[in-house]
Image: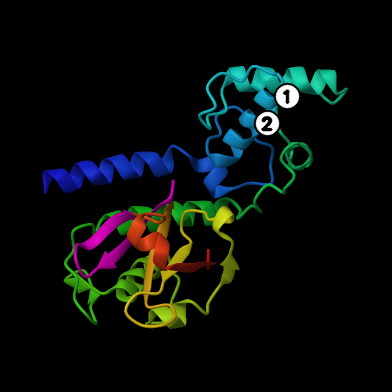
């Protein structure tokens, strides 16, 4: 149990120390933001010859100074922030669309709720904390934030809207083809290539979305938040 608690703390820290890029906002990237979108900006600025410090996905003062230097050189307003327009110019793609403050809070509640059940045993047909199967787990956790999902994984694959792999955000449903054709396993994306699901081997557990087992079976994602 102690090992499980440590794992929960570590994963929770990874996810919620990266709110800006994974919650994704159309507002400017700025000091305090973290994640893949920030890292993409850092890498581009470095290629352009600006000093950004560590390219670690953390938008700190050094990165802000590099943005200001670039803005000054390009005759842009100098504020040290990367607007959606500037991001698209630098990176060649749009910043992910904002979910809005209420939805971001819902995502946090969703993931907090999912962590409560790490270690819960797998139970085929299970839909409660006494035991979950994969879709029973996602349905139960989403119900905690007021969203009613279909009971089965293939039904859940039909709700919300599809999400490209490079646009995954915490709270997205991720689907896998396992024991039968089509979506037969579902989990909740946490960010940082991690997801949580109810597995027959480990119960509710966190795993690497792109690891050797799950990566080969991943078939897509849906966003319902």
Residue lying furthest right in this view?
Answer: 75
> Which image quarter: residue 132?
bottom left
Crowding around mark 1 (Cα neighbors within 10 Å: few <14, some 14 to 19, many 20+) is few
Q: Quadrant of residue 160?
A: bottom right
Q: Are marks 2 and 1 in contact (CB under 8 Å)?
A: yes
Counting from the top left corner in percent of width and height, residue 13 is at 35, 39
Residue 210 horizontal/vertical position (percent): 41, 55
Q: Which residues are magenta?
A: 191-207
Residue 144 at what x, y percent from top left? 37, 66
Task: Note whether 23 is above or below 87 in the view shown.
Answer: below
Q: Which mark is residue 48?
A: 1
Q: What is the C-alpha distance between the residues marked 2 and 1?
A: 6 Å
Q: Residue at x 24, y 44 (%)?
A: 7
Q: Residues within 10 Å of mark 2 (few under 14, many from 20)?
A: some
Is residue 78 visible from the viewing direction of this image?
A: no
* Local SS, label 1: loop
What residue sits right under mark 2 in the picture?
44
**Which type of secondary structure does the marked residue at label 2 adopt?**
helix
In the picture, the disc for residue 68 is none
Please tell me whether the stretch drawn in magenta is mainly helix, strand or loop: strand
- Please report the residue visible at 55 percent of the width from the left and 58 percent of the height from the top: 165
Q: Is 121 situated above or below 149?
A: above
- Say left or right for 190 vs 224: left
Give 173 or 79, whichever is nearer the viewer: 173
Seen in the image, is 47 located left or right of residue 133?
A: right
Q: From the viewer's side, name the closer residue of 116 and 215.
A: 215
């Amino acid at each position: 149990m102690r090992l499980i608690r440590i794992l929960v703390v570590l994963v929770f820290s990874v996810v919620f120390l990266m709110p800006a890029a994974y919650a994704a906002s159309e507002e400017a990237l700025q000091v305090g933001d973290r994640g893949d979108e920030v890292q993409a900006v850092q890498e581009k600025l470095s290629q352009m010859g600006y000093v950004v410090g560590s390219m670690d996905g953390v938008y700190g003062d050094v990165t802000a100074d590099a943005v200001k230097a670039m803005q000054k050189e390009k005759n842009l307003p100098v504020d040290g922030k990367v607007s959606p327009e500037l991001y698209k110019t630098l990176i060649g793609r749009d910043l992910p669309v904002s979910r809005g403050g209420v939805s971001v809070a819902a995502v946090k509640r969703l993931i907090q709720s999912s962590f409560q059940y790490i270690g819960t045993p797998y139970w085929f047909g299970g839909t409660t904390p006494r035991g979950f199967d994969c879709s029973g787990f996602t349905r139960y956790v989403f119900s905690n934030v007021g969203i009613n999902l279909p009971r089965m994984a293939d039904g859940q694959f039909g709700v919300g809207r599809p999400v490209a792999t490079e646009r995954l955000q915490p709270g997205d449903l991720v689907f896998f083809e396992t024991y039968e054709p089509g979506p037969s396993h579902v989990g909740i994306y946490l960010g940082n290539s991690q997801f949580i699901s109810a597995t027959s081997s480990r119960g509710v557990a966190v795993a690497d979305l792109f690891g050797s087992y799950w990566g080969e079976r991943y078939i897509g994602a849906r966003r319902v938040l």
